């Protein structure tokens, strides 16, 4: 049975990957997470008692602790999802993004390289370092075209610049040292367990509570939306079958303006939660984000052709599942919005 070390496993995408590995495979998982504000172990409650799951509260910038984790757990592969990821926060405070996303990735790469060099035979040949990144590294598209694996990098925010830097480090460690890496760049994720600072969960929870639904500018910025469980399946497939040194773009083929997304949520809530309907009356336009990229769209043709992956959810089916989940999981929502999840973490892991 393989042992997978997953950084950022208490985050939104990371927790989806952990749950799938534990529920759908016989793999062992080591979850390495610093537990910043967006790390929530309650998202892993369903698998936390599984004997194939282990948790390490470790900052990936702490070289000594990262090295210890590798020595003690001897992973067969690494999936690197730990990152600061909120664009607005990167604009108001970029230092944390530089530290975690760039220096943290460097620290992890060095620990993985030392570990990989200690392996022999099939263990060494089968090792992979899977770096999970974003389509934001490519910059902004015009009205036509798609991001492909050959698109030049043009990051426009501190967040995307830090992720672009980490992508380049991973590439360099492969070409310079031979470390067997794969990289994936994904479009906007949505789904259950999403921290409510992001558009879709924020709109759902604000609408349910009769609060304004903020939309930047005119709401005409376009994003490609990918259901988180579809993304997790793609990540597992790339880890298993992806070619070392290759990059795979993962997208949902679901281009929507921000206004269309919010309107779709309102329509679903009008049916499932009619109190306060029509919820679209809560839409409020706010000052646009500085340097706001106009359009992202991913060509996911390579991963479809080479590995046979395609999303199972349409935007409509995935969005309805997401709204239903937030309406049905009020305890999780209450724990996040009240901050109780952080109080629980403090009682379990004194710092």
Image (cartoon, grey):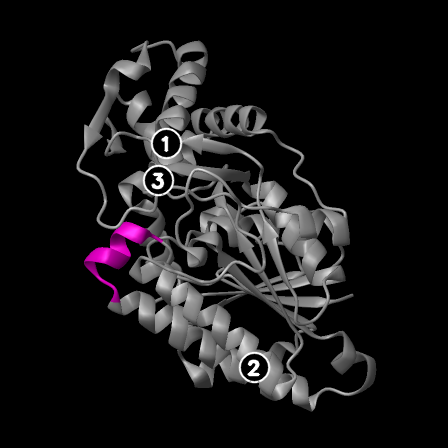
Q: Is residue 335 magenta?
A: no
Could you tell whether 153 is left or right of 196 in the image? right
Q: Which mark is residue 196?
A: 3
Q: CA distance from mark 1 to mark 3?
A: 16 Å
Q: Which residue lies under the disc numbered 1?
A: 258
Q: Which residue is mark 2?
A: 173
Q: Of 133 and 70, which appears nearest the observer?
A: 133
Q: Position of residue 57 (x, y in %)?
A: 45, 68
- Tell me which residue sits at (35%, 42%) in the image: 294
Q: Name the chief secondary structure element in magenta.
A: helix
Q: Could you tell me if the residues under marks 1 and 2 are in contact, i.e. CB atoms within 8 Å?
A: no
Residue sticking out furthest to the left: 287
22, 279: nearer the viewer: 279
Q: Secondary structure at mark 1?
A: helix
Question: 205 above or below 244?
Answer: above
Q: Horizontal and vertical percent for residue 208?
A: 32, 21
Compared to residue 217, the image places residue 61 above or below, namely: below
Q: Looking at the picture, does residue 92 appear above or below residue 98?
A: above
């Amino acid at each position: 049975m393989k042992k997978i070390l997953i950084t950022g496993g208490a985050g939104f995408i990371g927790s989806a990957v952990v749950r799938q590995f534990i529920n759908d495979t016989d793999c062992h998982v080591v979850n390495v997470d610093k537990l910043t504000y967006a790390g929530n172990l309650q998202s892993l409650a369903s698998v936390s008692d599984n004997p194939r799951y282990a948790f390490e509260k470790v900052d990936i910038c702490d070289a000594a602790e990262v090295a210890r984790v590798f020595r003690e757990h001897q992973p067969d592969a690494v999936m690197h999802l730990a990152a600061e990821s909120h664009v607005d926060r990167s604009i108001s405070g970029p230092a944390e993004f530089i530290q975690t996303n760039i220096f943290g990735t460097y620290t992890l790469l060095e620990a993985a390289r030392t570990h990989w060099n200690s392996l022999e035979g099939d263990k060494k040949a089968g090792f992979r370092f899977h770096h999970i990144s974003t389509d934001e590294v490519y910059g902004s598209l015009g009205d036509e075209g798609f991001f492909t694996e050959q698109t030049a990098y043009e990051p426009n925010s501190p967040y995307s610049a830090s992720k672009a830097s980490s992508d380049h480090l991973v590439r360099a460690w492969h070409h310079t040292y031979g470390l067997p890496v794969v990289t994936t760049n994904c479009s906007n994720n949505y789904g259950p367990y999403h921290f409510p600072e992001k558009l879709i969960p924020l709109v759902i929870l604000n609408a349910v509570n009769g609060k304004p639904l903020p939309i930047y500018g005119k709401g005409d910025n376009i994003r490609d939306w990918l259901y988180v469980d579809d993304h997790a399946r793609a990540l597992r497939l790339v880890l298993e079958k992806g070619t070392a040194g290759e990059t795979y773009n993962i997208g949902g083929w679901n281009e929507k303006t921000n206004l269309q997304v919010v309107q779709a949520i309102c329509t679903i809530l009008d049916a499932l939660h009619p109190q306060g309907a029509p919820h679209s009356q809560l839409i409020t336009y706010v000052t646009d984000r500085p340097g706001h990229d106009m359009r992202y769209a991913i060509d996911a043709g390579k991963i479809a052709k080479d590995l046979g992956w395609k999303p199972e959810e349409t935007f409509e089916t995935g969005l309805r599942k997401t709204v239903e989940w937030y309406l049905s999981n009020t305890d999780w929502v209450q724990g996040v919005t009240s901050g109780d999840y952080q109080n629980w973490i403090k009682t379990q892991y004194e710092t």
